[in-house]
Image (cartoon, grey):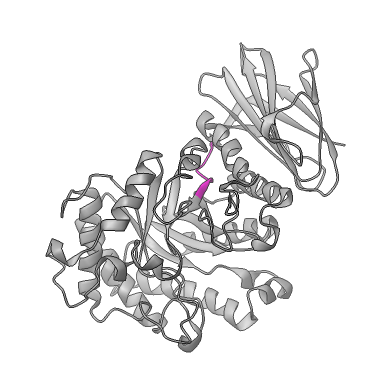
Amino acid sequence: MTSFHVDFNNKIGKIKPMHGVGNAPLLGCNNMLFHYLGEAGIPYSRLHDTGGNYGGGCFVDIANIFRDFNADPADPDSYDFAFTDWLIAELEKQNVQPFYRLGASIECEHYIRAYNIYPPADFQKWAEICAGIIRHYNEGWADGFHYGIQYWEIWNEPDNEPDIRDNPMWKGTKEEFFRLYEITSNALKSQFPHLKIGGYASCGFYAISDSAFSANANSSHRVEYFLEFFHDFLKYITSPEHKSPLDFFSWHSYMTIEKNISYAQYAREVLDAYGFTKTENILNEWNMGPNLRGTIEDASYISGMLCAMQNTPIDKMMYYDAQVHANYGGLFDPIHRTVFKSYYAFAAFNELYLLQNQAACTVPDEKDIIPLAAISEEGEAAAILVTNMNPVPVQVVCTLAPASGRRIAGITCLATDTSHAFTETKTFQFDAAQHRLICDLPEHSFYLFRVRMK
């Protein structure tokens, strides 16, 4: 048994948009699964590796949109927006905001031949191309739109390998990338000061963990390079001669919740130390790996991660990935063309997000029981999402303090476990006199308790 207390009278902050995803459930250009994004209230879709290898040859990537680098960036005919227009329009229909990565998709087969991951031949021209893309989607240029896309990310994982020959994301030196970032970020910020310009989608901070975790990232030398690159980048863009904006810093992790919490803290501390106290700290690729794909264990991990990271310095997260056929696509079943139970973790978290305000909640004494509570502004509606990541059932006892001047009028529960898929269950007890909720949480499960107050 484990216990914790929720105080709905104590609002401690806003529920953050942790339930973003990478990409969308593409089935070619069939949108039959996109409605799931809207129904789960997915706030952001990060557009990177979109459509598969090489951006599917037609989506998002600079090389797919501006196919001839010798063309004129000021000429609308130099751009091919067709497929990316379709994708972003479908996301907008579901009220999902694109988080647009400017650059290239990963080229895992680069050892045969690399195509789009070399430093651009002309950095200034590359920045002009990026500006053309922004004008198309935000200012109506080139028969475009007025979407108001806020986040524009410069490149992805240029730090992927210390040896250029091994790097599937950047066939240049780190100094060349720093220069590309400097030119592009300053150019874009001068033209679009109201937008968020940042990067660089770091591979992460595994080196601050022990050797076992470093080994999972292939080599200690490689993960140490991630940190070296991070610090050298910040030194470069804070130097008087290369000063550059950084509205957000994005990074990746494929580790445990415990490690991710430490990485989030590390990123915040380092950014602050370099003077970037207002820079958003965004984890926009995370996953525990494909081995548990489609299992209830994976679903419980995802729910636990969404809730646990709320209490860290992270500002936003995007799970990698919401594509159907990707190895790391843990939300959609490619055989039956429906959702895995992991999807419901996002739907459950969204109910907290819509309530807006995080309510104070004590930490349970049982390991891997992760609760998160939220309450509406007026106090008439609240919810508690409780995740059991343990391989055994755990009885949970939760005492509740109602919002000031209110009483608890009723509680319902949506369960996700081996026998429920975010469906109602009555397998809990509520003692109204004691304001005490008791529930036996099955192994690898998450239960959302909706609380009504009068």
Using the rendered image of the protein, determine whether residue 373 is visible from the camera's viewpoint: yes
Which residue is more in the foreground, 376 or 116? 116
Start and end of the magenta stretch? 14-20
Whether residue 33 appears in magenta in the rendering, the answer is no
Above or below residue 289? Residue 25 is above
Q: Residue at x 53, y 29 (%)?
A: 355
Residue 133, position in %: x, y?
Answer: 24, 59
Which residue is more in the foreground, 217 or 309? 217
Using the rendered image of the protein, determine whether residue 192 is visible from the camera's viewpoint: no
Residue 6, position in %: x, y?
Answer: 70, 29
Left or right: 12 in relation to 408? left
The residue most toward the right is 1
Which residue is more in the foreground, 350 or 381? 350
Q: Residue at x 48, y 81 (%)?
A: 167
Which residue is more in the foreground, 269 or 113? 113
The residue most toward the front is 336
